[in-house]
Image (tube, rainbow, N blue to C red):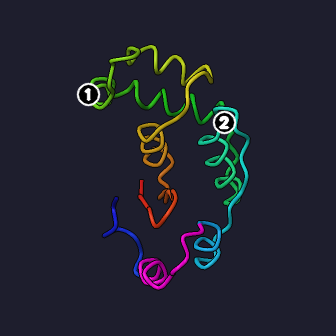
Amino acid sequence: MLWKKVPKILKRRLKEKKSNDMASQIADLNLCIYEMPSDGDCLFHALAHQLRRSGIEFTTQRLRAMAVEEIMKDFDYYRAFFDEEEISFEEHLKRVREQREWGGEMELQVLARTLNKKILVYQGFFFFSEV
């Protein structure tokens, strides 16, 4: 968790919040929960949705391709962070591009850097990470 990077106002609100209910925690932060299709593309749907709110249009397919293209530019660097126990890194990238693999932290970090956007991930009880 990158707690030190969470803005002070969010830290204060989270510390004051007593509820374990994610929806009420997010509402207290003046944020909303949007439902995304659970089709294996949820990370890319969520990112495309938020970019659209900023006036930037990307399809999930384009975001996937962009992530793979950027990873391929520095293949050896990213390969070092990938556990090839189940599948090879090359196969993982092929599956990401072909919409047969979920996007993960690596793809999210690559897209944040490529798009020059700060991405804040909220997962469950008081867990923020900034990408």
Q: Left or right: 38 with respect to 84?
A: right
Q: Position of residue 127 (x, y in %)?
A: 44, 62
Q: Which segment is the magenta one? A: 9-21
Can residue 102 be found in the magenta stretch? no
Q: Is residue 94 above or below residue 18?
A: above
The residue depicted at 33 percent of the width and 18 percent of the height is 85
Q: Position of residue 99 (x, y in %)?
A: 62, 24
Q: Quadrant of the N terminus?
A: bottom left
The CA distance from mark 2 to mark 1 is: 26 Å
Q: Which residue is mark 2?
A: 60
Q: Position of residue 105 (x, y in %)?
A: 43, 42
Q: Left or right: 125 with respect to 74?
A: right
Can residue 15 be found in the magenta stretch? yes
Q: Position of residue 88 (x, y in %)?
A: 38, 14
Q: Left or right: 51 with respect to 120?
A: right
Q: Is residue 44 above or below residue 2?
A: above
The residue depicted at 33 percent of the width and 19 percent of the height is 84
Q: Is residue 23 above or below residue 130?
A: below
Front position in the image: 12 or 89:
12
**Magenta segment main secondary structure:** helix
- The amino acid type found where label 2 is placed reads Thr
Front position in the image: 124 or 35:
124
Q: Which residue is mark 1?
A: 80
